[in-house]
Image (tube, helix red, strand yellow):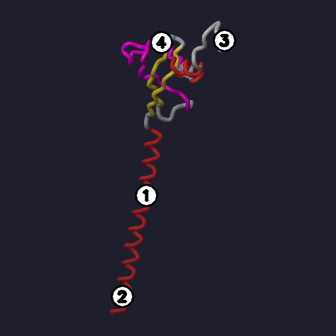
Amino acid sequence: MEMLLERWKGDAAAVVQGAADMISWILLAQLVLTLALALLVRNTLLVRRFWCALAHREVEVLFERPPLAIPPGRLAVRRCSACDPPSAIGCERRCEQAEHRLPCAPPIFDLIRQAGPPRLLGGSS
């Protein structure tokens, strides 16, 4: 009888250990799937500063990349410093395509620094 009880105790421990392993694997799989889904479903906000050809000035725009965007590079304009108020976008939204976003001109001080010190005309040095 004691031998039967010892054997049953060993089997019970194996069953409990197997159940605990199964539950931990299920929880791990659920966590991985939840994180993957959260990354796919969330909106991405991007702030870009560039020269706007329509406003003829430098603007700062808040873009939103929708979840599972098709095509993947598609952006939506949420705010623009050229509009008043910034959330009332009234232009053609060409800046949603990257080829219409021109880089900003460098600040005037950078241009002066690149040109070097001023030179006097007509004088010999």
The amino acid pointed to by label 1 is Leu
Do the CB atoms of the residues marked 1 and 2 lie less than 8 Å apart?
no
- Quickly name the residue at label 4: 91
Task: Say which residue label 1 marks.
Answer: 28
Of callouts 1 and 2, the N-terminal one: 2
Image-quadrant location for residue 117: top right
Q: Which mark is residue 6?
A: 2
- The mark closer to the camera, 1 or 2, is 1
Give the foreground label among 4 and 3.
Answer: 3
Judge left or right: residue 29 versus residue 106. left
Stretch of the chain drawn in magenta? 72-95
Q: Position of residue 17 (x, y in %)?
A: 39, 72
Mark pair 1, 4: CA separation:
48 Å
Question: What is the x, y in percent for residue 38?
Answer: 43, 43
How many numbered marks, from 0 up? 4
Residue at x-position 48% and y-position 23%? 49
Residue 4 is situated, as x and y percent measured from the top left of the image, at: 36, 89
Q: Nearer the viewer, residue 83 or 113?
A: 113
Whether pointer 3 and pointer 1 mark residues with C-beta atoms closer than 8 Å, the reply is no
Sequence-wise, the earlier of marks 3 and 1 is 1
Q: Earlier in the sequence, mark 4 or mark 3?
A: 4
Q: Residues within 10 Å of mark 1 (few under 14, many from 20)?
A: few
